[in-house]
Image (cartoon, grey):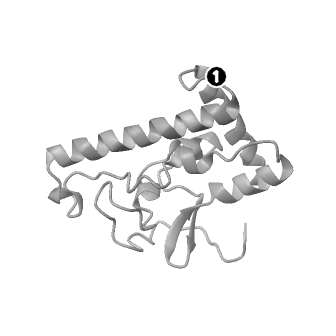
Amino acid sequence: MNGKSKSILPSEVGILPKPVYGEACNGCGVCCRTNLCLVALGVGIPRKITNCPLQKIEGGRVRCGAFDLEAAFLKDNPHKHPIVGDLLGSGGGCDCLILGSKEDSILSVADIMERQFSKRVFAYEARKKLAKQFGIHHESDALNDAFFSQLKSYSKYR
């Protein structure tokens, strides 16, 4: 990993305020400090950890260190395709819904349902794109196996 990144300490909560669920991601990192995502689990971070050690701070924003692992993997395996961005839902807005938070309490139940539906559509389209790259039907369990097999390969770059 490059010298400009550093791991986030648990005490570094609130680098940026969390955006409203579904709004553009601002790199606050609340999602990464409260839950492990499938990418983290796939590269071997133990489930009992909630403050993801893959987080990096760059330019006052949190970003996922799995992108660095993937870049190293793809350099050694140029025939493979990047998957981290799609698995994380990059470009789909804030995915950290915290009911009762000041940010998300402004949303009506209808707003939350609409944003969750949009996120599901976004994820479904990303899955179809990845399935095409892998040459596997998007509803096949083999696609999940392919994702986790590739993510597991990233762990050697940690």
Relative placement, left or right, of 95 versus 61 is left
10 Å crowding of disc 1: few (<14), some (14-19), many (20+): some
Q: In the image, what residue occupies the spot 78% across and 50% down?
A: 73
The image shows residue 78 at horizontal and vertical percentages of 82, 48
The image shows residue 153 at horizontal and vertical percentages of 75, 41
* Residue type at numbered disc 1: Ala
* Of residues 94 and 134, the one drawn nearer to the viewer in this rendering: 134
Where is 62 relative to 107, above or below? below
Q: In the image, what residue occupies the spot 37% across and 44% down?
A: 119
Q: The N terminus is located in which quarter?
A: bottom right
* Of residues 158 and 112, the one drawn nearer to the viewer in this rendering: 112
Count the marks.
Answer: 1
Q: Mark 1 points at which residue?
A: 142
Does residue 82 appear in this view?
Answer: yes
The image shows residue 52 at horizontal and vertical percentages of 53, 55
Q: The C terminus is located in which quarter?
A: bottom right
* Of residues 90 and 34, the one drawn nearer to the viewer in this rendering: 90
Q: In the image, what residue occupies the spot 22% across and 59% down?
A: 101
* Of residues 100 and 107, the one drawn nearer to the viewer in this rendering: 107
